[in-house]
Image (cartoon, helix red, strand yellow):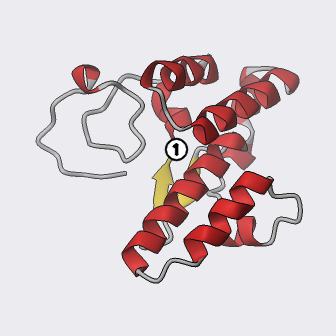
């Protein structure tokens, strides 16, 4: 399924171990919940928010430290970029397809739904496809 492809992509691309671990955790949850049925669950479509993480009493230690470190950054641009990375990692780990960008409030697709289909060529922020497999597009849209 999509999560198996995402795990293979993470291994091939040498992504950060935290994201690879999140993909593995999402795969385990999907398997435990009956495979594709878990991906159709409406909760995967609810964007993960900063508030969700900041108020989660069971937040993983690594994510909690990353969240605290991001919150401690003085530069707003760096802070938002770091928070977006933490939100993406946490969203993938929870099997979520979306998170809210802390800088803009826009919904951002995680790598999970993107790996399930061919590259659209629109420059998605978390595009899981290797550069040589990405489709060229004149669109500058960023998801």
Q: Looking at the image, is 142 positioned above or below residue 51?
A: above
Determine whether, in the image, residue 55 is placed left or right of residue 93. right
Mark 1 lies on a secondary structure that is loop
Residue 106 seen = no
Question: Farthest residue in the left direction?
Answer: 138
Determine whether, in the image, residue 89 is placed left or right of residue 80. right
Residue 99 seen = yes
Q: Position of residue 89 (x, y in %)?
A: 60, 47
Residue at 52% x, 44% y is: 110
**Quarter occupied by the N terminus:** top right
Residue at 11% x, 42% y is: 138
Residue at 70% x, 33% y is: 40
Q: Looking at the image, is 19 positioned above or below residue 37?
A: below
Q: Nearer the viewer, residue 3 or 137?
A: 3
Q: Looking at the image, is 41 positioned above or below residue 85?
A: above
Q: Position of residue 41 (x, y in %)?
A: 75, 39
Q: Residues within 10 Å of mark 1 (few under 14, many from 20)?
A: many
Q: Which residue is label 1 attached to?
A: 110
Question: Farthest residue in the bottom direction?
Answer: 74
Q: Position of residue 123 (x, y in %)?
A: 27, 43
Q: Nearer the viewer, residue 113 or 57?
A: 57
Q: Looking at the image, is 35 positioned above or below residue 29?
A: above
Residue at 72% x, 26% y is: 27
């Amino acid at each position: 399924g999509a999560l198996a492809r995402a795990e293979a992509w993470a291994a091939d691309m040498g992504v950060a171990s935290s994201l690879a671990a999140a993909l593995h955790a999402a795969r385990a949850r999907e398997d435990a919940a009956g495979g594709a049925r878990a991906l159709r669950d409406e909760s995967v479509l609810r964007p993960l928010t900063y508030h969700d993480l900041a108020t989660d009493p069971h937040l993983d230690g690594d994510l909690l430290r990353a969240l605290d470190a991001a919150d401690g950054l003085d530069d707003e641009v760096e802070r938002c970029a770091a928070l977006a990375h933490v939100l993406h990692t946490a969203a993938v780990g929870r099997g979520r397809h979306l998170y809210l960008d802390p800088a803009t409030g826009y919904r951002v697709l995680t790598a999970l739904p993107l790996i399930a289909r061919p590259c659209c060529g629109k420059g998605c922020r978390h595009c899981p496809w290797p550069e040589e497999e990405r489709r060229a597009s004149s669109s500058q849209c960023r998801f």
